[in-house]
Amino acid sequence: MQVRTKSGRNIEVPTAEEDARINAGVAADSDNPEWTKEDFARALPAAKFFAPEVYAALCAQRVRGPKNKPLKVPTTIRFDADVLAALKAGGRGWQTRVNEAMREWVSQQPRTLG
C-alpha cells in the first residue's frame, strides 16, 4: 500500500502481513533485540557515553564540498493569490523555478545587490 505525503512523495507502507513478518524477524534477531523500558532507562546521552573529542567530531557541522550546490535557506515570502496560483500551476518544482528567476533578476541588478 502507498501513502502520499503532503510534499507529494509516495511512501510504501507494509501490509499487516508484511508488518507481522518484519516484527517476527526483529524478535528473532538475538544480536539486536528490541529495547525494553529498562534498556531506555539505562541509556546515556551521547555526550556522556563518548569521549569529548569523539562526541565533538560526531556533532561537527558537515561542510559541503566545492562541487555541491549552495545550501538553500528557508524563508517566507508573500505573493498575491493569483501569482501563487500561476506559479503552482506549472506543477512540481515551482519553488526551484522561482529561485532560478530570482537568481537571473539578481544577476542583472547593479553590483550592490548581486
Image (spheres, helix red, strand yellow):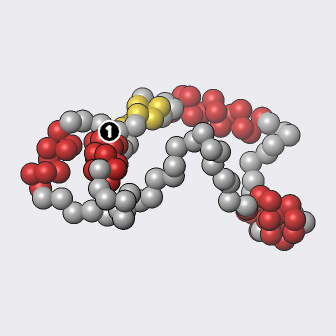
Res 46 seen here:
yes
| Rendering coords of residue 17 (x, y %) | 54, 28
Residue located at (32% from left, 64% from top)? 76
Q: Is the residue 60 above or below the residue 69 in the image?
A: below
Q: Where is residue 41 in the image (x, y as percent from the top left)?
A: 77, 68
Q: Name the residue under label 1.
A: 93
Residue 43 visible: no
Spot occupied by residue 55 in the image (x, y as percentages of width and height): 81, 64
Residue located 86% across and 40% down the image: 31
Quarter of the figure with the N terminus:
top left
- Seen at 45% across and 58% down, the residue is 73
Q: Is residue 26 above or below residue 70?
A: above
Observer-nearest of 2 and 18: 2
In the rendered view, would you say 112 is above or below 70?
Answer: below
Outermost residue toward the front in this view: 110
Question: Residue extending furthest right?
Answer: 51
| SS under mark 1 | loop
Is residue 21 found left or right of 40 in the rendered image? left
Residue 6: percent from left, percent from top: 34, 46
